[in-house]
Structure formats: structure tokens, C-alpha cells
Image (spheres, grey):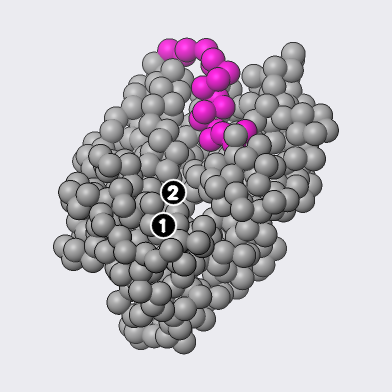
Amino acid sequence: MQTNFSLAQLADPKTAEAEAILRKCVHCGFCTATCPTYVTLGNELDSPRGRIYLIKDMLENDRQADETVATHVDRCLSCLACTTTCPSGVDYMHLIDHARVHVEKTYRRPLMTRLQRAVLAWLMPSPRLFRSAMTAAKLAKPFAGVMKRVPALRPFGAMLDLAPASLPAPSPYAVPGRFAAEGEKRKRVALLTGCVQSVMDPGINKAAIELMTRFGVEVVLPKGEGCCGSLRHHMGHEEPALASARRNIDAWIAEMDGDGLDAIVITGSGCGTTIKDYGHMLKSDPVYAAKASRVAALARDVTEMLDLLDLPELEQQGTRVAYHAACSLQHGQKITLQPKSLLRKAGFTVVDPAEGHLCCGSAGTYNMLQPEISSALKERKVRNLKAVKPDVIAAGNLGCITQIADAAGAPIVHTVQLLNWAYGGEKPAALG
């Protein structure tokens, strides 16, 4: 793509990076076939190619974002299916990230939208605040239907729809601590405690810890770490997201330089995609650039870590598992084989639903900020999952699990919970 940035504009490193990304696009349109919003809405401006044109025009002309740009940038799920499809290697992820920051700084959204985004950005990164909010949401949940009939309140109705009927009790697997390896210690890892997942389903990390320690891995939950920053990062809140990254980097570097770490293990694939990008996010920070790269190099999805442990092969047990590939895992981290290979090795029969490349519509806060598009994608995903008639659905991301659970027609659990069960751990509660 031809660009017309001035030398003065290109003196800004972020603009120069955006220009280099734009130049790689050859207008081929392959991305439109795998873009969930284009497939759903059929609008060129809701495809990666269309958004690239909007972003190019905005940045080249030093324009503030307007309603059109904000609308179509906000509709992007950041599923990154386009990057898997693109034959030219367009780094769409960092371009849309840059555009989101520009939109957030230069565009004033309607009042109720600003309020909703502010509430989400305030509550979700804090486990304490999020738990309090979810407890209060139980009381307001009966009013969700009424709120969705009022246009200005519809997003808040969508938020209430997603609120769970009950929450697990606070868990020892959601606070700083150390879990010793059983038998001979083979590795030492840090496990991300995180924010939302630690409140909504601490059983995911419990399963990961039990499974890893059973096979000789010491697991530490470092003091001082918290939200990875991805929730605010994808809302264009650059500085708060970087502050979260720096806090986690400090916590993990202390462990790396202390007793050492072989890996930083993450059970939420959305978090993993962001943490693996810390080196890029902080590359201009003279204090944190090198440390961020060290942390990013050690980041591993839990299935990557388990694959390295060479778990024993078990007899087939006849349980039919539909594997739902979270976008952040298959497109963001390019992890496609390990989860299914581990499940097969553990004795499960794994089946792939049709259109596995398309997003389920969760995408962090997307199902609350864009409920109509999210609902359409959810219906499509659920239809494909039901078609393969699974006994259980496995996924590597809590957002996907929450999005699909009430309509999938089969229980859905995290991949690591199924694996822990197969290798001697508790049966996942969702399976009865």
C-alpha cells in the first residue's frame, strides 16, 4: 500500500511503525474471508482491509478520530484471524492497537458508552472490586431484560447477562504462594494468578497447579503480580496497561533473579498473547525494555508447558471432546496442535467443529461493549459445536467458556481441567 507520511510524521517511532505495517498490505482481501465482523455484517469497513484504509487516512492526515473511525475500530474483536490468513505478513495486531490508542485520545464517545467503558476498566483488573461487583450484579440480574429494551442501557443489560449466578469462594490458588513439586523437581515456574479468572473460576489454576506439581514442577504465584493489562490495552488505555505490565515484570524478574524460573505459565490465552508481547509494548522504555523481553521470552501457555513434560499416554476412555480453539491461542500465539495432542494422549476422542477459525464473540470485554455482534457470533459458534455432538467442550480461555456455557448443549471446561482429571485429579464440577 502506498503511503504519504511526511518526514516530520515519521520522526515519531509509533507513526513510523504504523507506516511500515500499512506498506505491507497489498489489498488482496484474503482477510475478509476469515474476519468475523465482515462475515457477520458484510461491510467492507468492518473488515481488516477496510479498517486499514480508515486508519491510514486518519494517521496520514493527522486527524482526530471521528464517529466512523471509532465505530469500525471498536467493532474489531482483535481475534487476529486476519493475521493467520494474510499472505503478506501485515502486522495488524500492532496497527489496531495503535489506532485504539489514537481513538481513545482524540475521540469523545457518547456519555453512556464512556461510562460503561470506565466501569469495566475500573472493576475488571481488580479481583477485589470485581468480586464485589459480581456479588452486587446478582441482585440486579433480574432487571437485565428490562435494561436491554432501553437503547442507552442495553450494554449494561449485556453485562448483567454475563454475571454468574454464584461465585466460587476465595481460593488459596488465587493468592501468592508456593506449591512444591511431587517427587524429583524437574522445573520451576511462575503461574499468572490474573484478575477475572481468579474470581470467576480459580479451579482452572488449581487444576494447572495440581497437574504440573504431580509431574515434578514447582509452581510459584509471585507476590505483586496481577492483571496482565490486556483488558485495558484493548480499550486503548495505553498507560494503565503498561503500568500493569511493569508491575508484573517486576514480580517475575524478582523470581527469575532469585530462585530462577523455567517458564511463566498462563492459563488464560488472552493474557498469554499480551504477556508474550510485553517486549514490543515496552520496547521504547529505557528501564523496562530489556526486562520486558526477558519476561516475554519465558511466557508459555499452559498447554505449551505440559507438552514439554512428556505426559504418559493413557488408554482411550470414549469421552468425545469438541475442542474450541480460542482466537488468542490459535491466531494470537499460533498454538494449534498442543492442546488437541495433549487431550488425545490423555485418552479423549477429540473432534474439530466447523469454522473453528471464527471467534465466539467473547474477546475480553467485547461481548459487553458490542452485544449484538457478539450474540450473532455466539449463535454461529454454538451451532457448529452442537453439530459434532460432543460429551464435553474444551477451551483454553475463560472468556470463551463464559460466552458459550449457557447455550452449548454440553458442559464446557478449560483444557487443563480435563487433563488434570485424566491424570488423577478431580473430575471438573461442570461434568457433574
Q: Is any part of residue 19 visible from this angle? A: yes
Q: Position of residue 7 (x, y in %)?
A: 43, 63
- Quarter of the image with the N terminus is bottom left
**In this orientation, which residue lies closer to the viewer: 374 or 104?**
104
Q: Is any part of residue 124 visible from this angle? A: no
Badge 1 is on which residue?
18
Q: Which residues are magenta?
A: 298-315
Mark 1, Cα crowd under 10 Å, few <14 / some 14-19 / many 20+, is many
Q: Position of residue 78 (x, y in %)?
A: 39, 55
Kind of residue at badge 1: Ala
Mark in front: 1 vs 2: 1
Q: Is residue 57 magenta?
A: no
Badge 2 is on which residue?
401
380 relative position to 153: left or right: left
Q: Is residue 307 magenta?
A: yes
Q: Position of residue 98 (x, y in %)?
A: 46, 61
Secondary element type, mark 2: helix
Residue 367 vs 298, above or below: the answer is: below
